[in-house]
Image: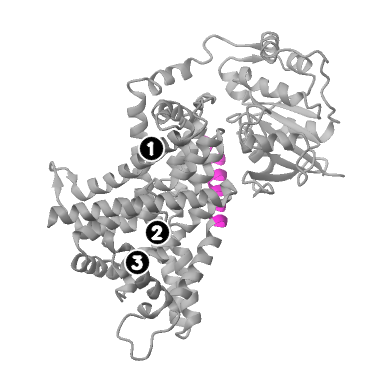
Amino acid sequence: MSGLLIALVGNPNCGKTALFNQLTGARQKVANFAGVTVERKEGSFTAPSGRTIKVLDLPGAYSLDALGPDEIITRDVCMGKVAEVGAPDVIVCVVDATNLRLNLRFVLEIRKLGRPMVLALNMMDAAHKRGIQIDQNTLQALLGIPVIQTVAIAGGGAKHLIEHIDTQSIKPPKIATTERDVHLEVRDILNAAVTMPSFTAKIDDQLDGVLLNPVFGLPILALLMFVVFQAVFAWATPLMDGIEGLFGWAAEMVRAQMPEGLLQSFIADAMISGVGSVLVFLPQILILFFFILVLEESGYLPRAAFLLDTLMARAGLTGRAFIPLLSSFACAIPGVMATRSIHDIRDRLTTIMIAPLMTCSARLPVYTLLIAAFIPERQVWGVLSFQGLVLFGLYIAGILSALIVAWVMKLLRTDKSPAMLLMELPSYRLPNPRNLALGLWERAGIFMRRITGVIFAANTLLWVLATFPRAPANATQPAIDYSFAGMIGHAIEPIFRPIGFTWEICIALIPGMAAREVAVSALGTVYAISGSEDAVANQLQATVTAQWSLATGFSLLAWYIFAPQCLSTLAVIRRETNSWKFVGLTTGYLFALAYLASFLTYSVTRMVTG
């Protein structure tokens, strides 16, 4: 039997992706549509007849009058304009049965395309619990298309949809030629086919009365974010230690089994240790995404964006920027990728350009080293750690800097019309464990594919710079001092001398371009410190305390708040904007801020300390 291509479309939060997971299970892949950054999720399943059915999960959209890249792709695929996909044989329009008033507007737009389509009346279990009665036959007659009930989160919840697609010949919808106002048509359909009890949204209203309360809403959100960040760092530590130990063991095995030389150094240092230095942060990213998925599936995340909309509007953003910026605290890469949900292109570009200012986890090794070296370990008010307060201040500095930069960008815009926040507040619901697991698996795959190649290439280049030319036989300095990296460090030292950086720091900044945390191991190499990881950390801290001034230490802390020392993030910005212009603008303004902040910090600290 010939195959069939079906495209799943629908509003965000309608359960479309859950239905996609129900249909395809693990038989799915994520790529990109050609020439754009929008993800392309495909899967397949075998119908009872033996026919292979290919499923395309299109990005969520509210209208075919596209506002962003995701909605443009959805529109073009539905219209058969994307050559790599072709016209879908059947469009399955997924709707939330508890929110037909909003969802039916999009259904009527899709219906106007005149293509074979089916309406998947999803979340029927939730509709029944709320006492919502939907006359399926009446709805089907009014729309002129097949209407099938589904429960995407339940086993067998897509059975009737599969049977219908497999056995029925689905034809284009039968609709009247008379054009009607879409709002009036939705009203008439709801009046004829849906009985909505007055108490149906009582739970939502009660929860919103607390969570969106003008007094309690923001403190509750702040408390949730505090719990999330505590979990990101507390829960991830054992997993990160395990990954770090695994890659450290693998590198040591290579050094033990292979004869000393260039090949051994390349495999152990550039390949294993280099890639491992980035993969070690995967647990933090997955834990953060776990909470984001839970908050999203529960219906709370759009409400958080709503709560922050007024505050972020002062900086020229909308509440939608909250989610990408939240993701950037784990890593700016998924944060930049998450800006696709922002429809206004001005807000999206601004959010992309300020995402690197969020204090990502890769900065922590540098912060930890410098705080331990220069900040005394004492208690404030008997309960708070002074070092912890300094670290918290660095986080706040990043957030405030991002808001200030966004505000400046708002002033520089030629189009100063405000961007409106238009988003659905879905019903509250319990997250589905299967969807959480598949979402985390998908995110892990994206992270692995998109950064390991960049990191490997960067580490290979930097390994070459740090290894060649080789130190002479009568060398009295560390080998790196004679390498291309050492030469570059000495060459650029005059540029960084006004902000207190030594040539050793300048060298460490070079491999730190691959990933910020690499700078710590690079400093260990520069100062010829060897031994176990703990021994290197302790010796390096002692060396830094002894050889650097307090002004230099504070200057480097200020530098790392701003400096765009992450080639992977810049590569993703290039991919997401499809422009080197924004890569250059982002890199330029971040370096300028970093240099200015370090100069002021260095000068003021020297003045105060004498």
Residues in magenta, as a range: 431-450
Image x and y of residue 447, in percent: 53, 53
Identify the residue at image location x=27%, y=48%: 391
**Between 122 and 477, the one nearer to me in the picture:** 477
Q: Please, is residue 62 above or below residue 190 in the view?
A: below
Q: Nearer the viewer, residue 538 or 561?
A: 561
Residue 237 in the image: x percent, y percent?
36, 54
Q: Which residue is mark 3?
A: 506
Q: Residues within 10 Å of mark 3 (few under 14, many from 20)?
A: many
455 in relation to 217, above or below: below
Would you name the residue on which mark 1 appears? 403
Question: Measuring 33% from the left and 80% from the top, which residue is drawn there?
Answer: 478
Question: Of residues 451 and 431, which is closer to you in this image?
Answer: 451
Report, in whole angstroms, how far the alpha carbon at label 2 lies from the one at label 1: 22 Å
User: Mark 3 belongs to which amino acid?
Assistant: Cys
Amino acid on which the number 1 mark rests in the picture: Leu
User: For numbered disc 1, what is the local secondary structure?
Assistant: helix
**Most prominent secondary structure in the magenta stretch?**
helix
Q: Is residue 438 magenta?
A: yes
Choose the circle earlier in sequence order: 3 or 2: 3
Relative image position of residue 87 (x, y in whole percent): 80, 38
Residue under circle 2? 516
Q: Is residue 240 magenta?
A: no
